Image (cartoon, helix red, strand yellow):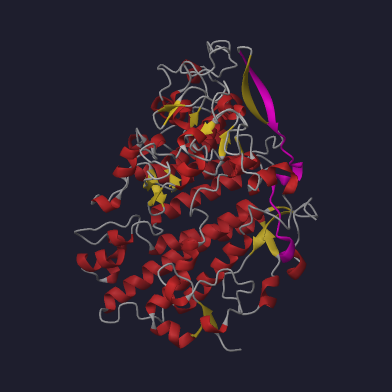
Amino acid sequence: MKHYRILFAFSLIASLGFVAGCDDPFNPEENFRMNIDQVISRPQYAEGLLDYAYTQLPYRTFRFDEVATDDAVSNQISNTYRAMATGAWTALSNAQDMWTVCYRSIMNINDFLTIVDKVNWKESTPALNVAFKQRLTGEAYALRGVMKYFLLQNHAGLGTDGTLLGIPEYNDFVSSLEDFSAPRQTFAQSVESADQDFDLALQYLPMDYVDVAEVPAQFTDLKLTADQYNIAFGSGFTQRISGRIVQAYKARLALLAASPRFNEAGSASLWETAANANAKVLSDLGGLEYFDPNGNLFWLKAQVEDSDLGLGNKKETNEIIWRREMQDINTWETDNYAPTVYGHGRINPTQNFVDAFPMKNGYPIDNASSEYDAQHPYANRDPRLAQIVVYDMSKEWNQTIHILDGTTNDGIDKTEYSTRTGYYMRKHLREDVSVQTGKTSTQKHIIPIIRATEIYLNYAEAANEAWGPDGKGSNGYSAREVIAAIRKRAGISQPDAYLEGIASKEDMRKLIRNERRIELSFEGARFWDLRRWKEDLTEPANGIRLEDGVYRTFKVEDRNFKPYMVYGPIPFNEVLKFGFVQNQGWD
């Protein structure tokens, strides 16, 4: 059969056409076909195979799938996660489907790996040609591992015979649809496969893309000058996948494998592996000394400007391990400001989520020592509550938001753009953005892919499970010390008596999970965290009303999930076409 390549690239979309929507990735439209010699002779076209995988990472914007959890609802009737949460999640209709985009990316990557050594990337400079091949090869292995990670997170599960299954493995270019009938591997085999890709990538990639005065020891065999090194591995490639990002994904993968969803036996060795993998990332960064004092406010003006490489600073803030390019937009403000400040109020945090915030003294609100006052529910709370949530009589865009007295369109269910819960989302929104008709403005926004705070929380979770609240293994800090740093940064009063009083692994686990819920809120963590932990998926989403001077909780929306839905489905069409074993319950 004649061998054709399918080309995808961000930079070439306009000139080549973007065919990611094709139903059949092996038979693109004739106008988009290019034979092997043409691809090899044009480096920018060859790199398009790799660049396509970047375009398919699920971070083009926030998904806000918290709407399918106990943390939020949406006032938008057509919201796909609202439908999912209320009973419309099937193998045929899956808003969390990553199967097609990940495997299409993997096929492009595999194709790229067959030609990377044949392309003259820098024909006039042999040493640079080799260096470019090395970097691009490393990126390919890294991206393939990332795609496998998302396939495992979204689609691995218990097969119909009770076997814990992963995904089909395709590490070579597949030239026909028939070759897609490879069986699903076991979950352990799939984890190993992804981890091997990450290890291969680390052999090729620099830890960070920075300009140097002296070539790092890892690359001396390439016989590059410092200037040549900077052309191949320097700051011009910032935000492409690097060795440090690969380490972070290895750590994420290890935590996934250790979690109750895939580690039903509670293997301590898996938790130790996860703890050490996350500690490796943190230790290379600088441990707790690296902790960013403003990292939990990464979306605000000062932090955005600190991360803006376009302002001449070629180094990210300590908080950001990987992010996509900044977006100069007002989309999130248009979608999520309250109605009286011209927004559509789409994402509504729940009372469940608000109740997760402790008091400023660090005690949960249901603890006798918390000093929580049900008649003044927002007084003396954890400062993060006001930073993340707009509640009754707080300010947004310098205006007081009247939610519970019903006097404005900000009130519950007043209009199609009003909150359903009594709350609006504040996180991610820059209040120097206007969405008022005739006076609109935009500002730069950060979409983080991996934050250092996540890695700290990953470590704390795994270390606690492996060694208890104060165990460190061979690392320099314990779960308690990490959580102490996070809560101190948040503004919890010191000394943190509640944290200091925790003695058991079980109580520390509860606190770590709650801190993760707060710190990573509205960043796409909660949906999969609940499933990783095999926690209750059916807790109704609640709101708050003020009736006769009394705050009363009410049910806003039921959550219609079945126990088997801790695992996502294999797409129905893939099971039908290729006979893949489906996960239990999804038939």
- Is residue 62 visible in this depiction of the protein? yes
Residue situated in front as seen by the camera: 410 or 189: 410
Quadrant in the rendering for residue 193: bottom right
Q: Was residue 17 drawn as part of the magenta stretch in this picture?
A: no
Looking at the rendering, the stretch of residues picked out in magenta corresponds to 550-574
Q: Where does the C terminus fall, quadrant-wise?
A: bottom right
The residue lying at 54 percent from left, 20 percent from top is 502
Residue 556 vertical placement versus 17 (above, below): above
Residue 335 vertical placement versus 143 (above, below): above
The residue lying at 57 percent from left, 89 percent from top is 2
Q: Where does the N terminus fall, quadrant-wise?
A: bottom right
Q: Is residue 318 left or right of residue 259?
A: left
Residue most toward the front?
438
The residue lying at 73 percent from left, 41 percent from top is 561
Residue 338 rendering spot, x and y as whole percentages: 50, 34
Residue situated in front as seen by the camera: 199 or 530: 530
Residue 498 rendering spot, x and y as whole percentages: 50, 17
Q: Is residue 58 left or right of residue 481?
A: right
Residue 563 rendering spot, x and y as whole percentages: 75, 41
Q: Is residue 290 left or right of residue 30?
A: left
Q: Was residue 557 drawn as part of the magenta stretch in this picture?
A: yes
Quadrant in the rendering for residue 231: bottom left
Residue 40 rendering spot, x and y as whole percentages: 42, 83
Residue situated in front as seen by the camera: 323 or 121: 323
- Is residue 196 visible in this depiction of the protein? no
